[in-house]
Amino acid sequence: MLEREIDMSGPGAPIETVEDEDLIASDKVEGTSVYGSDHRKVGHVHNFMVNKRTGQVAHVVVSDGGLFGLGASRYVRLAWQDLAYAPELGGYVAQITKAMVEERGRESADDAEMQIW
Amino acid sequence: MLEREIDMSGPGAPIETVEDEDLIASDKVEGTSVYGSDHRKVGHVHNFMVNKRTGQVAHVVVSDGGLFGLGASRYVRLAWQDLAYAPELGGYVAQITKAMVEERGRESADDAEMQIW
């Protein structure tokens, strides 16, 4: 579904399928664009946190990437279920906006609170 | 617990804490070394597959990285719970060996079957 190239793991390595109907690869989620409820780009998936014992995703960290790619990024945490993939945008849509992230995002992913908007 | 450097997400960005007692970051799991039950290195975590709906990790893809980093890699799939972090090794330990991966691993992560040894 996403258009970006998939890393090859080495010379001669086959290209992996990185998702199927039910599953998606961890490294395909990371870096994927996130759009707001207004369909304007908010940022991208920085990474996501997984429960060490159970393997359940606890939350996703979204970064705005800084202003024009400069300056400190802002981070918010969203629930996995709060990100819906939109093929027409090539990214996830969440019920947030760029302004909300700028205003309420934290400068460290550690400090980013779970956002319930 | 891991020693390797964490990527900064941009100029001036704070260094993230990438794990706590219960959670670990997706991009910290990827690339982490995997050791066999004999404590000899088997390979590394290629990525892991997550259920799109529930956010539950379905399985982890381990690659042997090819012979001396050359040639096609071999892939096996393991359950999340089958990888135990060993601080003294700086990686995960699984009940597999390099020889098992060479013999039974697949050339594509897609084709790799869930390994129950």
Image (spheres, coloured by chain):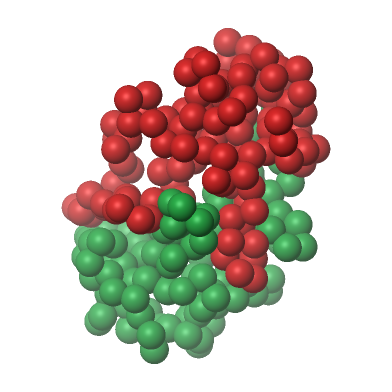
Chain colours: A green, B red
Vertical placement of B2 versus B89: above or below?
Answer: below
The mark total stands at 0
**Closer to the camera in the image, B53 or A86:** B53
Residue B45 screen position, x and y as percent: 54, 35
Vertical placement of B72 versus A111: above or below?
Answer: above
Quadrant (top left, top right, bottom left, bottom right) of the N terminus of chain A: bottom right
Residue A55 screen position, x and y as percent: 52, 55
B47 horizontally vs B105: left or right: left
- Residue drawn at the location 26% of the way across and 80% of the way down: A104
A80 horizontally vs A69: left or right: right
Quadrant (top left, top right, bottom left, bottom right) of the C terminus of chain A: bottom left
Residue lying at the far top of the rendered structure: B68
**Closer to the camera in the image, A17 or A3:** A17
Instruction: Choose top left, top right, bottom left or bottom right for residue A16.
Output: top right
Residue A51 screen position, x and y as percent: 44, 57
A65 horizontally vs A6: left or right: left
- Residue drawn at the location 55% of the way across and 45% of the way down: B81
- Residue drawn at the location 51% of the way across and 70% of the way down: A80
**Closer to the camera in the image, A115 or A55:** A55
Residue B42 screen position, x and y as percent: 56, 21
